[in-house]
Image (tube, rainbow, N blue to C red):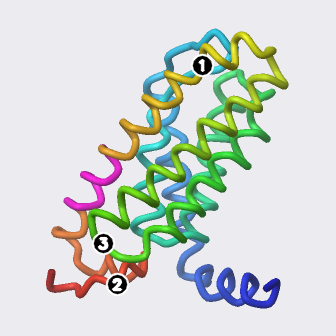
């Protein structure tokens, strides 16, 4: 198992993907900071899920996981929410990993099931983090907002990926979605 993970990571992360990871992490950080809606749990809602879903669809689980974890965590650090950064790194990184592993084909059922499962993980993860940081009440109140953030991120991230794959067909091969570049 550990050997398979090591092989998967080393296959996904090569020298030529490091600049891609850096650029996409910066873009994800900026997108997460662009719109910030404060929540009762002393956190904020943002558009980071858009880039989490896009990165996982476009670049696969490992690269998407790095981008999805680092970008929003950096946004927390820069925006004055450092107490959330480690939770965000883990929750959003795992969300992108889940999308990347569960969405293996560019088919509606695969995309919906995998993306919704990853969104459910995010809502659950932020509920636990909110409970730890702010208590049960604020964590419960944040659930609808986190559901909305995940849903908007899924829709916009999917639309962005769909548009990008038409404009730049090699993108489909990077994410390994089993789609011929001519589709």
Mark 3 neighbour class, 10 Å CA radius: few under 14, some 14 to 19, many 20 or more: some
Residue located beneath label 2 in the image = 178
Look at the magenta stretch and give its main secondary structure.
helix
Residue 7 highlighted magenta (yes or no) = no
Q: Position of residue 75 (x, y in %)?
A: 62, 35
Residue located beneath label 1 in the image = 142
Q: Is residue 7 left or right of residue 1?
A: left
The residue positioned 44% from the left and 34% from the top of the image is 47
Where on the picture, by quarter, is residue 40?
Answer: top right
Alpha carbons under labels 3 and 1: distance apart: 31 Å
The reply to whether dot 3 and dot 1 touch (C-beta < 8 Å) is no
Alpha carbons under labels 1 and 2: distance apart: 36 Å
Secondary structure at numbered mark 1: helix
The residue positioned 70% from the left and 90% from the top of the image is 7
Q: Taking 154 as reference, is 135 above or below it?
A: above
Earlier in the chain: of badge 1 and badge 2, it is: 1
Alpha carbons under labels 2 and 3: distance apart: 7 Å
Q: Position of residue 161 (x, y in %)?
A: 29, 60
Residue 157 highlighted magenta (yes or no) = yes
Earlier in the chain: of badge 2 and badge 3, it is: 3
Which of 67/113 is in front?
113
Residue located beneath label 3 in the image = 106
Q: Position of residue 170 (x, y in %)?
A: 29, 81
Q: What span is colored magenta in the figure?
A: 156-163
Where on the picture, by quarter, is residue 11?
Answer: bottom right
């Amino acid at each position: 198992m550990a050997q398979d993970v090591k092989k998967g990571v080393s296959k996904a992360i090569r020298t030529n993907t490091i600049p891609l990871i850096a650029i996409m992490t910066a873009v994800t950080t900026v997108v997460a900071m662009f719109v910030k809606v404060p929540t009762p749990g002393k956190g904020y809602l943002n558009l980071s899920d858009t880039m989490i879903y896009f990165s996982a669809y476009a670049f696969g689980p490992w690269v998407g996981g790095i981008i999805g974890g680092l970008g929003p965590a950096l946004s927390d650090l820069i925006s004055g929410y450092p107490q959330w950064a480690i939770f965000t790194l883990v929750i959003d990184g795992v969300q992108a990993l889940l999308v990347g592993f569960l969405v293996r084909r560019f088919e509606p059922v695969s995309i919906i099931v995998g993306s919704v499962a990853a969104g459910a993980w995010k809502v659950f993860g932020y509920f636990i983090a909110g409970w730890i940081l702010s208590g049960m009440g604020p964590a419960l109140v944040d659930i609808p907002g986190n559901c909305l953030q995940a849903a908007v991120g899924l829709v916009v991230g999917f639309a962005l990926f769909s548009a990008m794959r038409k404009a730049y067909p090699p993108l489909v091969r990077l994410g390994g979605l089993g789609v011929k570049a001519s589709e």
